Structure formats: structure tokens, C-alpha cells
């Protein structure tokens, strides 16, 4: 596994990191996001969508009730939120595994609630609070599936 750690000091910086992530993604990529309420998963997702060419006027919000949002970028983007999915069985019965393969990019909030359903190729992104405006964002993935330096963005 390889990891890269980033510190952001504002929602804007988190969005900019998301843009860089979005810009290097390709069809079939799955981003498994984890982190407590309000750490910035949706903020990061907005940036990722932007980096994938989704129009900035398209609202990107937590699909907590709808389970899935879909955006049209250079690549199709599925945005899932597993907060309300109680079990791995419920995940499958809801047909959500359908979004894990194919020609889209899939961003999944609360992926850590259902670790076992995530593919080995998933890029894990954990967000945590440092303080009110500061977040630690840790990107971890298996180098068998992604170029080792893919998510290394320098400064
Ligand atoms: N460095 C930062 N990065 C991201 N968000 C930040 C940062 N500093 C402060 N914030 C604030 O934290 C909140 C993050 O909200 P966001 O909806 O993105 O979190 P979330 O992890 O998706 O929450 P939920 O679990 O409810 O879906 C926003 O109110 C944002 O303004
Ligand atoms: Mg959210």
C-alpha cells in the first residue's frame, strides 16, 4: 500500500486537492471516503467532480437520502453515501454494487461502514479534524492497481 498525506486549512484548499485528485482519475476508479461528520467528504467530492469536468453550477451534495447522485463530467460520476445503509446485505439488496464497476468514477462517502464490499482497487481517502479549519487528508491505495505516484501532488 502507498499513502500520501495532505493538510488543508480551508474548504477551498480541500476543494483544490479534490480537483487535483479528479484530474488524474480514469473510468472505473472507486474512491472510498471516510471520516467523521463534517470533516469535509462532500467538500472534497465537490472538488473531485470539478476536476472530472463536472460543471461548477451542478450542485454536489451528500446523497444521504437519495443514496446516489449522478453527474456528467468528462467521465460519468456516481456519488454514493452509505451513512444510512445498515448492513452489507442492505448494500447489495439496494443494488449499490452496480455502481462499483463499469465506465464511471464512483465516489463513496462513509465507505468505512462497509469495508468488505469495497473493491481491492479502491482508493481510500480518510479525512480527520486537526482543528476548526484544518483537516488531515490521507490517501491510501494498492500500488498493484494504480501508479505509485498518481496521488502525489507536491505542494
Ligand atoms: N479544511 C477544510 N476542509 C473542508 N471543510 C472544512 C475545512 N475547514 C472547515 N470546513 C467546514 O467543514 C464542513 C465540511 O462539511 P462537509 O459536508 O463537506 O462534510 P462531510 O464530511 O461530507 O459531512 P457528512 O458526514 O455530514 O456528510 C463545512 O462546513 C466546511 O465549511
Ligand atoms: Mg457529506
Image: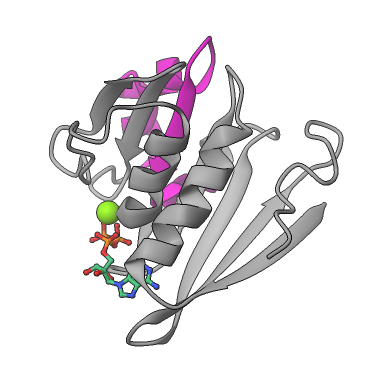
Picture residue at 27% right of the left edge, 22% below the top: 70
In the picture, measured across the screen, residue 152 lies left or right of residue 115, that is: right
Quadrant the C terminus occupies? bottom right
Nearer to us in this view, 73 or 29: 73
Q: Please identify the residue farthest to the bottom as the structure is shown.
A: 131
The magenta segment is: 87-115
Q: Quadrant of residue 79?
A: top left
Nearer to us in this view, 90 or 105: 105
In the rendered image of this protein, does residue 155 appear above or below residue 90?
below
Nearer to us in this view, 131 or 141: 131
The percent position of residue 104, horizontal first and vertical second, equals 48, 16
In the picture, measured across the screen, residue 112 lies left or right of residue 10, that is: right
Q: Magenta includes 65?
A: no
In the picture, measured across the screen, residue 54 lies left or right of residue 100, that is: left
Picture residue at 46% right of the left edge, 54% below the top: 16
Instruction: Ligand 2: give its quadrant.
Output: bottom left
The percent position of residue 54, horizontal first and vertical second, equals 34, 27
Picture residue at 40% right of the left edge, 46% below the top: 47
In the rendered image of this protein, does residue 91 appear above or below residue 84?
above
Q: Quadrant of residue 146?
A: top right
Observer able to see residue 94: no
In the picture, measured across the screen, residue 44 lies left or right of residue 145, that is: left
Q: Please identify the residue farthest to the top as the structure is shown.
A: 103
In the rendered image of this protein, does residue 12 appear above or below residue 15?
below
Q: Magenta includes 104?
A: yes
The percent position of residue 43, horizontal first and vertical second, equals 32, 55
Observer able to see residue 154: yes
Nearer to us in this view, 136 or 145: 136
In the rendered image of this protein, does residue 102 appear above or below residue 80?
above
Picture residue at 63% right of the left edge, 43% below the top: 123
Amino acid at each position: 500500500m502507498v499513502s500520501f498525506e495532505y493538510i488543508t486549512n480551508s474548504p477551498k484548499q480541500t476543494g483544490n486537492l479534490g480537483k487535483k485528485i479528479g484530474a488524474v482519475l480514469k473510468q472505473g476508479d472507486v474512491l472510498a471516503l471516510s471520516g467523521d461528520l463534517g470533516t469535509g467528504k462532500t467538500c472534497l467530492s465537490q472538488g473531485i467532480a470539478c476536476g472530472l469536468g463536472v460543471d461548477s453550477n451542478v450542485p454536489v451534495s451528500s446523497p444521504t437520502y437519495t443514496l446516489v447522485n449522478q453527474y456528467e463530467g468528462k467521465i460519468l460520476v456516481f456519488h454514493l453515501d452509505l451513512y444510512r445503509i445498515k448492513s452489507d446485505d442492505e448494500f447489495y439488496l439496494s443494488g449499490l454494487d452496480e455502481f462499483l464497476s463499469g465506465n464511471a468514477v464512483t465516489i463513496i462517502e462513509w465507505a468505512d461502514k462497509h469495508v468488505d464490499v469495497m473493491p481491492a482497487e479502491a482508493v481510500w481517502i480518510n479525512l480527520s479534524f486537526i482543528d476548526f479549519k484544518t483537516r488531515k487528508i490521507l490517501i491510501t491505495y494498492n500500488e498493484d492497481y494504480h501508479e505509485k505516484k498518481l496521488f502525489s501532488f507536491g505542494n
